[in-house]
Amino acid sequence: MVERSTEFIVAVVDDDRTTLESLENLLEAAGHAVRLFGHAAALLDSGSLHEIDCLISDVGMPGMDGLELMQLAHGARPELPVILITGRPAELLQRAAPETQSYYQLFQKPFNGQELLTTVNRALRDSRSAS
Amino acid sequence: MIQFPGFQDYLEQKPLEEADLEQASLEQEIARLRAELERARAELAHLARVSSLGTLAAAIAHEVTQPLTGVIINASTCAAMLGMDPPNLISAGETARRIMRDAHRACEVVARLRALFDKRARTLEVIDLNDAAREVATLSSSELCRAGIILRQEYTDPLPPVSGDRVQLQQVILNLLLNATDAMRAVEDRPRLLTIRTQPDGADHVSLSVRDAGPGFEPRGVEKFFEPFYTTKPDGMGIGLSVSRSIVESHHGRLWGVLNEGPGATFAFAIPRAAKTLM
C-alpha cells in the first residue's frame, strides 16, 4: 500500500452551475483539489480522467448522461469511485442494466453536503487501500 | 261472430307483454351500462387530473431542488469553515452570501407558483394567452435549458383575449412544451429549437402552437397520440395529450398535431375568443 502525499483530485460534472459551485466550495474547504465540468464531454476532452481520484457526476445532463459517463470512465479506470447525484431518481429506474449499477453511492438532490463529503472521503480511502 | 271480450286481446297481448318485458329489461341494461360508462369516464378524468398535476409537481420539484441543493451544500461548507481553527471567516462570509442568493432563487420559484395558483377559482376568466404562455415558459425555463432547448417566443401582441380556466390552459401549454422537449432529446445535428407562437385563428378563435425540431411522427399515427395511455416514452403514462385535448374541448376548442415542412412537428390548439360580455 502506497501512501499518497499529494491531495486528492475530485472531478465534478453537472450542468447546473449552482451545484458545481457549491460542491467546489465544499470539497476545497475539505482540502481536496477540484476539477469542474459542465457536461460529460468536457471531462473526457480535458484528458484529466487518468489523474482524478474520485468522480462525482449528475445523472440527467444534455448530451451524454451520467450513467454513460460512468460506464466510459469505468472502461478506462475500473477502480475509480463514481458518486452519482440526481434530481430525479426515475432516471435510474429507466435504465436497470447491471452495468449502470456500478456507482459507489447515489445521492438524490437536495442532499446533505456533509454526508456527501463523508462518502467522498470513504471512497478515497477505500480505493487507496485497494490499490 | 261471437266475441269473447278479452280473448283476442289475450292472444295478442301475451307476446306484446313479453316484448314489453324484454324492452324493459333491455332499457334497464342500457341504463346500467350507461352508468358504468359514466363511472369509468369519471375515473379516467380523475386519473388524468391527478397525473397532469403529477407532471406539474415534478417540474416544480425540479425548479426548487436546484437552488436548495446549493443552499444545503453551502450551509454545511459554511459550518465547516467556521469550525476550523482558526475559523475561516472570509470564506464563510462568502459562502453565507451564496446561501442567501440561492435561497432567494428558491423563493422566486415559490412566488411565481403562488401567482399561478392564486387565481384558482374554477370560474371562467378572461385570459391573455400570451401572459399564460410566458408564465409557463418562465416556470419551465431551467427544464428547457437543461435539455439544451433554444426557446423562441413569437407572440402576436395584442392578442384577442379568451375565456377559460387559466391553470388548466397552462397545464396544456406546459404539456406541449414538455412533449416538444422530450421529442428533441436525441437531436444532435441541428439546434433544438422550440417555438411557441400565438395568433388569431379565423375571425373568432385564438391559437397557440408549439413547434419542435424533433424526429416528427408517422403521418398516419398522429391520432394515436391522443388516445389515453398511448406513449412513446419509457417513463410516460400516455395521458398528457388526451388530457390536454379534453381540457381544450371543454373550452369549446380543438387540439391537433401536424408534421412541419422541415424537421419536427407542431402541436397546436385553438379556442374561441372571449365573448364581448365577459370583457
Image: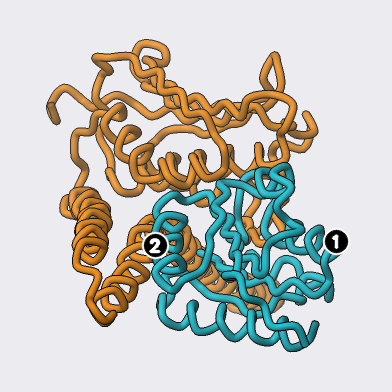
Q: Chain A shown in which color?
A: cyan
> What residue is shown at x 74% (from left), y 63% (from top)?
A70
Q: Position of residue B161 (x, y in %)?
A: 24, 25
State which quarter of the image contains the C terminus of chain B. Answer: top left
- Asked if residue A12 shows in the view, the reply is yes
- Asked if residue B30 shows in the view, the reply is no
Q: Residues within 10 Å of mark 2 (few under 14, many from 20)?
A: some
Q: Is residue B261 above or below residue B234?
A: above
- SS at badge 1: helix
Q: Position of residue A4 (x, y in %)?
A: 67, 77
> Which residue is nearer to you in this view: B71 or A26?
A26
Type of amino acid under label 2:
Asn
Q: Residues within 10 Å of mark 1 (few under 14, many from 20)?
A: few
- SS at badge 2: helix
Q: Position of residue B140 (x, y in %)?
A: 41, 44
Q: Is residue B220 left or right of residue B183?
A: right
Tell me which numbered mark, 2 or 1, is placed earlier along the sequence: 2
> What residue is shown at x 20% (from left), y 57% (from top)?
B97
Q: Position of residue A16 (x, y in %)?
A: 47, 51
Residue at label 2?
A: A25
Residue lying at the far front in this picture: please name it: A5
Residue at label 1?
A: A76
Q: Which chain is orange?
A: B
> What residue is shown at x 87% (from left), y 63% (from top)?
A75
Q: Is residue B180 above or below residue B206?
A: below
State which quarter of the image contains the N terminus of chain B. Answer: bottom right
Type of amino acid under label 1:
Ala
**Chain letter behind tag 2:** A
Q: Please check whether the numbered discs 2 and 1 fall on a single chain.
A: yes
